[in-house]
Image: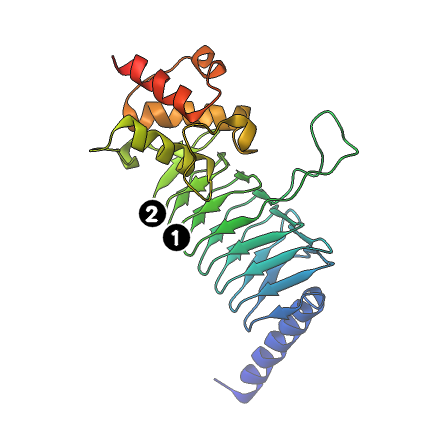
Amino acid sequence: MSANSRAGRFVVRWLSEQRNAAWLRGCNGVGLGADLCGRPYIKNEGVTRIGTGFRLSSRPVVSHLVTGPQGRLEIGDRVAIDYGAAIACLSSVRIGDGTRIGPFCVLADSDFHVVGDRDKTPEPRPVQIGDRVQIGARVTIVPGTSIGDGAIVCAHSVVGGVVSAGTVVSGVPARIRVDERSVLTGASDLERIPDLVRRILGLRYMPALTHGPDDFAEWDSLGSLRLLLAIEDELGLRLAEHDMLRVHTVADLVAAVQRASS
């Protein structure tokens, strides 16, 4: 390679690095090798830290990274985010190393308004995405979601709660694909139903039999639907939606499962 060619490549690389540095200047820390395609919208009023080898596309559609005053957005090493993506952090969003996020994905730790009262802002719920996660196109990740290492989220899915490491989920709401589902065995309903509620709703601790929807914000109408789908997938039982309307506690859910299995 001639000296002129080497010099030309050096100038191109230098100009690219200067352009990327300008777009990422508002972040609190950016690792080496950041590569931006197009012109993203980046607004950091809190803390935004990005690891090495970061790739963000905003062509042909702009991608958005927005961190509020109390927010902390942490993006690991070798993370790639495709065009048209939108990430909003008012409290805490963490994306692990080697994760890939497809085009037109939406990820937020807040709903920004309460249903029925647009002037009221709900409490943000942290979003945690593990290492080497693959997220397909047009996926929506709702507040409070935790996705384990190596999980795959299929395109057009809506994800909430806890996605276990290494699983493949899809749908609205997203659930474990039949060929990848885990099956609960060797436990009584009094043991496995509370554990199912904990996993599906993403609770930090095992609920008591007396706990119910009034005790957990995650146990809303979407949470109830996700429980119905999980019971069908993991236990092979089908509950009607009107059965869930009579469920006011975990004990009620155990009774409904026992009736369906009898």
Is residue 163 depicted above or below 4 in this figure?
Answer: above
Rendered location of residue 94, percent (x, y): 54, 55
Is residue 210 depicted above or below 15 in this figure?
Answer: above
| Closer to the camera in the image, 49 or 7 | 49
- The dot on residue 166 is 2
Q: Secondary structure at mark 2?
A: loop
Rendered location of residue 71, percent (x, y): 67, 55
Report the amino acid beneath label 1: Asp
Rendered location of residue 140, percent (x, y): 55, 38
Q: Earlier in the sequence, mark 2 or mark 1?
A: 1
Q: Residues within 10 Å of mark 2 (few under 14, many from 20)?
A: some
Q: Secondary structure at mark 1?
A: loop
- The dot on residue 149 is 1
- Quarter containing the C terminus: top left
Is residue 63 depicted above or below 255 in this figure?
Answer: below
Residue shown at 73% from the left, 38% from the top: 121
| Closer to the camera in the image, 10 or 56 | 56
Residue sitting at the far right? 119
Residue sitting at the far left? 186
Report the amino acid beneath label 2: Gly
Is residue 103 depicted above or below 228 in this figure?
Answer: below
Q: Residues within 10 Å of mark 1 (few under 14, many from 20)?
A: many
Residue shown at 44% from the left, 41% from the top: 162
How is the protein colored in the picture?
rainbow
